[in-house]
Amino acid sequence: MSEYPLGSSEDREMLAKMPMEKLLDYFFLQIRNLWRVDGLYFLGIEKKFGTEAATVIDAGVWEAMAAIEAKSLQKMFQVSENPNVSAIIGLLRKSSWALDQPFKTVELSDKRAVLSINRCRTQEARLNKGLGEFPCKKVRFGYLENFAKTLNPNVEVNCMVCPPDKHPPNLWCKWEFVLP
């Protein structure tokens, strides 16, 4: 149990009574809601101040969130200081961003990992609303690099492709994590 319990004992008891499948559905719904709020804030800022201002704000928020999330997950799952790439990816896969990306693939070796997002719900939602692709590279790179470097400052994060880069229809972004 953490210094600050996650939820009251009543809330924990209520959730503990849920069947596992329902609890998992509820858990993923709450993650989806976090990303809905993020999207709504972004759209509001974008409408009032433009895409560039919204992107700068979003990048700062997600860079800060990366460090918070990495440290929290590291503590919760008792991962040592300066973990290897496999452990970093293991924690990243437990992050709110990765859990909200159901269409991902991970290639993993001892000192290198490649994370690919084959479909992106955020981008697909923008396209469905006629907003066009969001050039998310700055936001996502800041998040992923800060997440990884919070855990191990020696890790290198490289963007292989991410909008505004041209990409094939079945790949939105691809990221490499390497320990030299």
Image: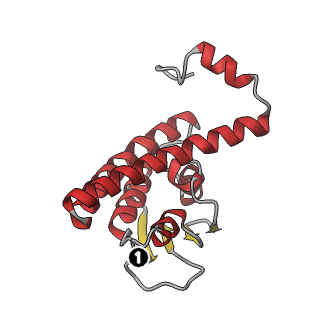
Q: Is residue 53 left or right of residue 11?
A: left
Picture layout, residue 100 above or below residue 25: below
Please state the total of marks drawn on the protein image: 1
Q: Nearer the viewer, residue 159 or 25?
A: 25
Q: Which residue is denoted by mark 1 in the rendering?
A: 163
Image color mode: secondary structure
Q: Image check: 26 left or right of 30?
A: right
- Which quadrant, please, contains the N terminus? top right
Report the front residue among 36 and 169: 36
Q: Residue at x 56, y 49 (%)?
A: 91
Tell me which corner region of the image, top left, top right, bottom left or bottom right, holds residue 51: bottom left
Q: Amino acid under label 1? A: Pro
Q: Is residue 144 above or below residue 128?
A: above
Picture residue at 78% right of the left edge, 40% below the top: 21
Q: Quadrant of residue 146?
A: bottom left
Q: Quadrant of the C terminus?
A: bottom left
Q: Position of residue 47 (x, y in %)?
A: 26, 60
Q: Residue furthest top?
A: 10
Most foreground residue, 6 or 14: 14
* Mark 1 crowdedness (10 Å alpha carbons): few <14, some 14-19, many ≥20: some
Q: Is residue 11 above or below residue 169?
A: above
At which x and y percent is residue 174? 51, 74
Using the rendered image of the protein, determine whether residue 151 is visible from the camera's viewpoint: yes
